[in-house]
Amino acid sequence: MARDYYEILGVAKNASADEIKKAYRRLAREYHPDKGGDEKKFKEINEAYQVLSDPHKRSQYDQYGQTFEQARQGGGFSGFNGYRDFSSFADAFDFFNQSRQAEGREEDFGNLGDIFSGIFGSGRRSRGKSRRGQDIGVDAEITLEEAYSGTTKEFNIYKTVACPKCQGSGAEPGSEIRTCSRCKGSGQVEETGRAAFFSFSQVRTCPECHGTGRKPEKNCSQCGGDGRIKEYKNISVMIPAGIDDGQVISLKGQGEAGSQGSPAGDLYLTIRLKPHKTFVRKGDEIFFDLEISFTQAVFGGKIEIPTLSGSVELKIPEGIESGAVIQLKGKGMNRLRARGSGDMLVKIKIRTPKNLNRRQKELFDKLKEEGL
């Protein structure tokens, strides 16, 4: 029996999305194979996170528990003989309700159409619908300097890829792919059943060809006919200069592989900007607090300060007040997909003298006498 995903990540069942993400990051760093971690444990952590980080998958998992994966892969749920579309069944019950109410009877079985559609979805599938692979979401943590100049990041992602033996077709090399004999190439089958005093019909995805309408004469011995296998894949992503926290980079076709040669999903990379010890970023502008001495504030002068493009000499005007802001044109962030850079805003903070010696106190006494 599969382990509890919440237990794998070490979080409570009512954990927030942020708590789940923090637990995943911590465990992924601890068990990553490249850092000497346990590969099997790392795969478990990834699998748990892929489910619990997706609100829809998490809802299904919370509802069906340990049978979630089998139900999701098999297209049905234990005890319902594979029926996922109960729309016809529910419509019959709703009609039964209306009939009984018209006869003046008080019994009301509720809107079962709403109940079953909420649990199982509509279940209607368009003929020949491509079984596109799932999208993948990944967070990328970068420094402010990397965001300023742009960088390239490498990611080792455990995902489904096209089977190398059958090239994603699902067929054993040398065998043919034929029209499915069960659905006659439509990708759907219709089944009927009875409940009490009425019958209902159900159109669902063909269980033989999984909706493709075609089936290998002999399934691939490596992937079992699915056309996909799970493995770690290194993906290199170029992050452009000027990108900001929360922005997303989309990589088409870099998500999970589709089954039996269907298109792959996409990879969505969400940028997370690490806090900087010196600078604060707001859009294209960079903010920097500069502490100066009392005498520097009085007499002015030149001070060397850091910027994202290197050190520069800042001119402090005479008599500057604490809280004043000096603007450095073009010394802020590079603009994303545009020319030029934002500005750097230097906020002045005057350092109050402390622990003065006797001579210094005498000098300040004289300044006080002069009314300064």
Image (cartoon, rainbow, N blue to C red):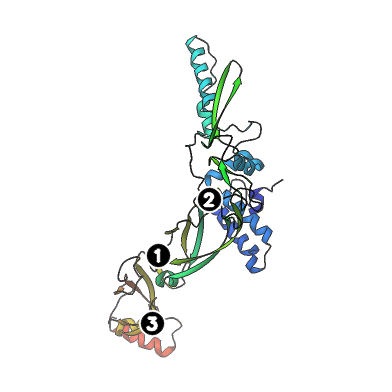
Look at 30% across and 85% down and name the residue there.
Answer: 299
Q: Which residue is mark 1?
A: 243
Could you say which is closer to the camera, residue 88 or residue 17? 88
Mark 2: few/some/many CA within 10 Å (<14, 14-19, 20+)? many
Could you say which is closer to the camera, residue 306 or residue 356? 306
- Front: mark 2 or 1: 2
- Residue 306: image quadrant is bottom left
- Report, in whole angstroms, how far the alpha carbon at label 3 lies from the one at label 1: 22 Å
Compared across the picture, whether 101 is left or right of 318 comes to: right
Q: Amino acid at mark 1?
A: Ile
Secondary structure beneath label 2: helix
Which numbered dot is residue 261? 2
Is residue 157 in sight in this rendering? yes
Mark 1: few/some/many CA within 10 Å (<14, 14-19, 20+)? many
Farthest residue to the top: give it. 103
Secondary structure beneath label 3: loop
Q: Which residue is mark 3?
A: 311
Compared across the picture, whether 11 is left or right of 129 comes to: right
Q: Amino acid at mark 3?
A: Ser
- Report, in whole angstroms, how far the alpha carbon at label 2 lies from the one at label 1: 34 Å
- Front: mark 3 or 1: 1
| Image coords of residue 187 (percent x, y) | 53, 37
